[in-house]
Amino acid sequence: MRIDLHTHSTASDGTDTPAELVRNAAAGGLDVVALTDHDTVGGHAEARAALPEGLTLVTGAELSCRIDGVSLHLLAYLFDPDEPELARERELVRDDRVPRAQGMVAKLRDLGVPVTWEQVARIAGDGAVGRPHIATALVDLGVVPTVSDAFTSEWLANDGRAYVDKHELDPFEAVRLVKAAGGVTVFAHPLAVKRGSCVPESVLAELAASGLDGIEADHMDHDAPTRARLHAMAADLGLLATGSSDYHGSRKTCRLGEYTTDPEIYGEIVRRATGAFPVPGTGG
């Protein structure tokens, strides 16, 4: 089985619609794909309706969190999307995305970049606007050669000149909320240092003790030594170690299935979940 547990669609900051994403996942030889748009479940219905035969959909979301001034992302799988407390927190994060993005546009303009809010909003379309949309605008303007090059201290990284904070969950509270909604939690790309500051390993241990289920070890932003280190940490802390592409369509260079999750780990995620269940494709 080939299992990719971290992808994005146009419901947040990917370039594939949810329907295109599941079709591309099947065409790329995946057996299981998780749709984990940022702070939203808005793409799930379309993905479910278009799910090809032979492909299983895992519903999820990537939750925006912050602790001690450091941002981190928490992958939440197979939770009840209608659980009111978690739904309310996702809405608070989404509502803050527009003023936050407008603030980053204003900072960029102060730095001499002729980007406009109208340009960013057009790129985002109906998706939850975020830094990748602004990064795409910088590419279009010739400021940086690629989206990844916009995520530096010069521009949009967590310590960047144009960075603006947004409402984010405390990760311990996020773990609690997802578990209360019957879901399973995995810390996304925990040592992706190229994105900016990472939380200390002591916090990872505290999250594990508070119910975190796993860490995303195999990821494009982790080099080989980092991946090995994370697998060892997962073993020491009793955490599941997953692998994922973090696919964003044409917005990033990663491919669907570039990194995958062991079927036994996937089976344990499914076993632990009580809020929702994987959706088998029927050729929709």
Image (cartoon, grey):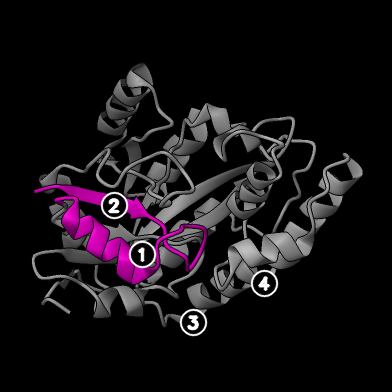
State the extent of the magenta-drawn residues as a range. 1-29
Identify the amino acid type marked 4: Asp
Q: Which mark is residue 84?
A: 3
Residue 182 visible in the picture: no
Query: Disc 1 designates what residue?
Result: 60
- The reply to whether callout 1 and callout 2 are in contact (CB within 8 Å) is yes
Query: Disc 2 designates what residue?
Result: 5
Mark in the foreground, 4 or 3:
4
Q: Residue at x 59, y 54 (%)?
A: 170
Identify the amino acid type marked 2: Leu
Mark in the foreground, 3 or 2:
2
The location of residue 27, given as percent across then percent down, is 17, 56
Query: Disc 4 designates what residue?
Result: 95
Precedes in sequence: disc 1 or disc 2: 2
Identify the amino acid type marked 1: Gly
Give the CA distance from mark 3 to mark 2: 24 Å
